[in-house]
Image: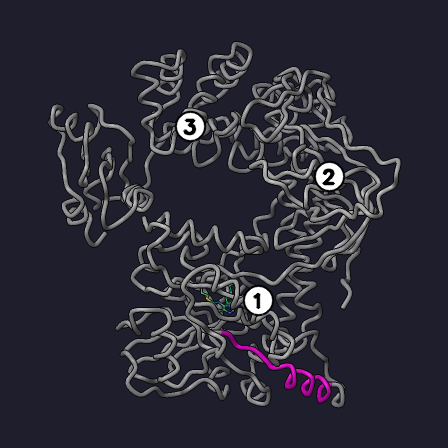
Amino acid sequence: MASKTDISDLDVEALSEDQAKAALAKLAVELSAANAAYHTDDAPEISDAEYDRLKRLNSAVEERFLHLKRPDSASDQVGAAVASGFGKLTHSVAMLSLANAFTDEDVQEFDISIRKYLGFGADMPLAYTAEPKIDGLSLSLRYENGVLIQAATRGDGSVGENVTANARTIADIPHQLEGAPDVLEVRGEVYMSHADFTALNTQQEARGGKTFANPRNAAAGSLRQLDAEITRARPLRFFAYAWGSISAPLGQTQWEAIARLKALGFETNPLTKRCTGPSEMIAHYTDIEAQRAALGYDIDGVVYKVDDLALQGRLGFRSTTPRWAIAHKFPAELAWTTLEGIDIQVGRTGALSPVARLTPVTVGGVVVSNATLHNEDYIKGFDSKGQVIRGGKDIRVGDLVQVYRAGDVIPKVADVDTDKRSAQATPFEFPRTCPQCGSDAVREEGDAVRRCTGGLICPAQAVEKLKHFVARGAFDIDGMGAKQVEQFHTDGWITEPADIFTLQERYGSGLQQLKNREGWGDKSASALFAAIEDKRKIPLARLLFGLGIRHVGEAASNMVALHYGSWDALEQAMDAARDRTGAAWDDLLAIDGMGAVMAGSLVGAFAQEAERASITRLVAQLDVADAVRADTTGSPVAGKTVVFTGTLEKMTRVEAKARAERLGAKVAGSVSAKTDILVAGPGAGSKAKKAAELGIETLDEDGWLALIEGL
Ligand code: IVH
């Protein structure tokens, strides 16, 4: 089905800010109409693929124009928004999504990161289950004392639709269970088989009704019928693969739990397999992929889950995905096209990024006209570790290249056809000077990226820094986006962040100056000045992040802000640490997660004269709010500084740190007078000695666990 809009061939990279704003508005209308149609009609107006495409497009535009993101953005919803016709049900345990793996290496990485988190050596056995990822819609079924009392769709992940009456009409869903735990929420996928889908469409056509684009659409449309009798007439099926609240465990492993669900009367997928590690998982993936067409229902990948449920518990969740599972997706669509040119973009930290300009080509339903080429090594045929990629083939202008979109929105170049290469084609010469300011572009040892050395004199860096400054996560100034920054910068109205806060003073008299500019009216000008005023008072972490110091991202900024508390303390500490030795430097390095590179970059920014002067001018305009910790009332370790040393036997360092921080503790890497608790496992050496000398409370691992038990 074609999109109703003219955004079908939108080139995100080429959008102006106004176009982006218009596109986002249009996408919001399209997506919410699609959501509504999905829910009220049994025939959505656009296909699921089209819906996904619009959603991805929406994210891509938002990614380029962070500040234009709408409060009702579809990107903030895990699934479709809850429809109004059904009652709402809050999930007692959130229904999450899964992180994706696209390559065999991603699967190896998944195993490695889990081992790392758990502290498992490469030789320790670690089993996983591997099962098809069903392309339907997820459903949570709540049984109390063996009776089905509630069924809810995923909705936005925390609140779903109450589709109990509809779920009761599905033959695969038992109404009563024998011998189940008192409370049992069974989760799984509602889907429709290919044969049933075809028959349904034929029937719909014969009746003059609407047909469905694909089985998933048909399943979703059929389940979300306000009249459950319509659902009953639709051949829906259900595979159980997970659970929410339970009053008693279903087993000790995923494998046992699935077997238990089967014994209780649920359909479970027969292709579920227990694997000893990545090679078996990948072999099973290949096996499932080979059977894909013959299965009779749609699947879009294979889901791997850590088998041991106790380990799943330890691994826990990130914000929207479990750490213990991953979806290995089937390959993305590929397309061949011509590389017309390579442009070099200059980023905020001076990084020179090559961008492929392509003859437009459709990949997975989207027209792609540019793709990232990462860095100069990538063009030459090497990855960031210096390993050969694409068999060492380099990429040249004029080449036929293979483009793909794998899950994420930014297209990439996968391969190049050197057989079709013209004899005249020459290797791409990566510039040695900045294309924007002409300064030397150098590549430092260990850096995959060549960078412009122009600093603040490079207009591209200055503009990118300003864009970063006004973006989300940083100052997040409404009405001040990439376009305005570019406009103001070109005209010399702003050259550095401080200028934003004197804009009104300098140009706002009677608003005439600003109002006279193209694209500005009375309302937008006053709104901009109000938005700027609104950010004069700014939390320390946002200020720090807004400075755009290399290596200092949002998480690091939070960490540093919490450590120093106030701007004055931070500034003094940076000055004291300037020569990179002594107590202030050690204190900076002691912030857990702080490495010498990040610390050096941070201290360097304060030590560099021009940059520091620019920071000082900015701070003079601001009222910087001290950093405050999240409310962790009731936690015995809130606000305390904890150091872990020696071998931990029940958890890894990463895990221990994550947990301590969740409880409001500050985790440091070395013992100092500021340390409150030292948790020392076997083999603790100098840190334990130092703690003893300083009279710091020292606990062993069990003592620590007892202290935080139940929290
Ligand atoms: S496990 C905590 N297993 O994929 C995560 N999900 O992208 C629990 N899905 O929302 C999900 N087949 O709708 C799991 N075998 C399977 C699945 C599966 C399909 C869906 C499910 C989930 C989505 C995540």
Quarter assignment of residue 433: top right
Secondary structure that dominates the magenta span = helix
Amino acid type shown at disc 2: Asp
Quarter assignment of residue 406: bottom right
Along the viewing direction, whichever of 360 and 138 lies nearer the viewer: 360
**Above or below, comparing residue 648 to residue 281 in the picture:** above
Amino acid type shown at disc 3: Leu
Identify the element where label 3 is drawn: helix
Residue at the disc numbered 2: 394
Residue 242 coordinates in the image, percent (x, y): 41, 70
Residue 285 coordinates in the image, percent (x, y): 54, 66
- Residue 108 shown left or right of residue 465 in the figure: left
Mark 2 Cα within 10 Å, few/some/many (few <14, many 20+)? some
Q: Does 327 lie within the magenta span? A: no
Query: Residue at horizontal 70%, vertical 31%?
Result: 345
Query: Residue at horizontal 34%, vertical 59%?
Result: 125
Between discs 2 and 1, the one toward the N terminus: 1
Marks 1/3: CA–CA distance = 50 Å
The dot on residue 286 is: 1
In this view, the residue farthest toward the top is 609
Q: Contact (CB < 8 A) between labels 2 and 3? A: no
Marks 2/1: CA–CA distance = 30 Å
Residue at the disc numbered 3: 540
Mark 1 Cα within 10 Å, few/some/many (few <14, many 20+)? some
Along the viewing direction, whichever of 690 and 415 lies nearer the viewer: 415
Q: Does 201 lie within the magenta span? A: yes
- Residue 708 shown left or right of residue 75 in the figure: left
Marks 2/3: CA–CA distance = 45 Å
Identify the element where label 1 is drawn: helix
Mark 3 Cα within 10 Å, few/some/many (few <14, many 20+)? many
Q: Quadrant of the N terminus?
A: bottom right
Segment tinted magenta in the rendering: 189-204
